[in-house]
Amino acid sequence: MGHRVLLVGMGAREHAVAWKLRQSPLVDELFIAPGNAGTSRLGTNLAVQPKDIEGLVKAAKEQRIDFYLATMDDPQPLGLVDRLTAEGILCYGPTQAAARLESSKAWSKEFMVAHGIRTAAARTFSDYREACRYVESLGDRPVVVKSSGLAAGKGVIVCNNGHEALQALDIAMVRRDFGSAGDTVLIEQRLYGWETSCHAFCDGKIAVMMPFSSDYKRAGDGDTGLNTGGMGAYSPSAGVTPEMAAAVQREVVEPTLEGMAAAGTPYCGTLYPGLMVTEDGVSVIEYNARFGDPETQALIVRLESDLFEVCRAAAEGKLDQVDVRWSDQASVGVVMASAGYPATYKLGYIIRGLEDIDPDVQVFHAGTKDDARGIVTSGGRVLTVVASGPTIAAARTRAYDNVRRISFTDAFYRKDIAAGL
């Protein structure tokens, strides 16, 4: 008998995971809460929001779910895995305690220091005046001000000098732009280098690394404009050598799993440390206790193994018993967004051209929904178009060729994803 699987989220990441799960002979039914127009073609969308833990548990029981695969950040810190496990549902995802790696930057910073995992030096403050005094004591040294809690990827402010750092403290702790996430802040040494994303399947004891990927956070070409959830990604990451990948596994991923197990909170699920490669080596910027978006869209098309089989083995603590294989092909994903994103934007525009896409190019939906006119826009990030090729340049050419076939009013996308690689 096939499995009945639950995903939670409404992004292109969830559509990508659903697309891959649909290819598994082990998956019978797929439920996505709340999903989008893309996921509705692959399974059943459920009208439950990601933070509604009671609603999700109720839906899981009603739909006889027997497997939950965690993809996004919100449900795990609120205890969804703990609740579903108590109902006898097998889960691939961290418990509430293990999810602190992401949900509390203050806790994870202490964890990294305690376990010798390289990261930027930082001080933690819950008192606004004390934080200001500390910034003033640093003079004009560049720092990064981070809200400790979950802030939808927006609670990090990079500051060039003391004036900007004081402004950042005002935004987080006085104006409270990030809500309760800014109750505690970290003031961190600013690192210089280039970023890459590491993802790993984890079963509480061991980790199996995924290929490296790189994403683009700023809204505009040339890394200008506001920070977004991510405007595109590619894999494999240019600049990550086999030696560097081995060092990240040895110095970051394995000590993290050992430290979490030793603390009595073993980590099961996808671990995604964001990394900065500096002159001194690789440092962890922050942990994410989930799949990345848009990195997942670029990674998933390279996975040759059965995703359900891999995640079920991890949930059962048997990751060493599955073979995780990846394609040698490169992949590039380009996000199509609504004009104005990540600030204000309009919704409800008809999306045209989705039927004109090459058969081996994937269009993963994010801010989309069905209405009487067809598929329409319903969010800031609308679609991620992902193409593969023998090189990053070839994959890039194909991705943009297909992006240009899709149109909706006020559509915009970066023209420089994976450029020059």
Image (spheres, grey):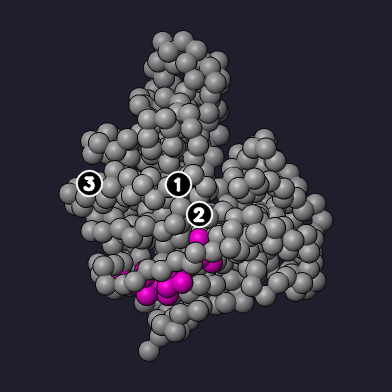
Q: Residue at x 42, y 75 (%)?
A: 306
Quadrant position of the N terminus in the picture: bottom left
In screen coordinates, is 256 left or right of 148?
Answer: left
Q: Position of residue 261 (x, y in %)?
A: 20, 52
Q: Residue at x 70, y 41 (%)?
A: 221
Range drawn in magenta:
299-313
Q: Looking at the image, can residue 290 be seen?
A: no
The relative height of residue 196 versus residue 121 in the rendered view (above or below) is below
**Which of the labelled discs sits on residue 236, or is there none?**
2
Q: Position of residue 178 (x, y in %)?
A: 52, 37
Dot 2: what SS?
loop
Foreground residue among 240 and 384: 240
Q: Position of residue 277 (x, y in %)?
A: 44, 37
Q: Is residue 310 magenta?
A: yes
Q: Residue at x 59, y 45 (%)?
A: 216
**Which of the labelled discs sits on residue 212, or is there none?**
none
Query: Gap in Å between the C-alphas at discs 2 and 3?
Result: 28 Å
**Which of the labelled discs sits on residue 240, or is there none?**
1
Near mark 3 (Cα within 10 A), the count class, few <14, some 14-19 or many ≥20, is: some
Q: Residue at x 68, y 46 (%)?
A: 416
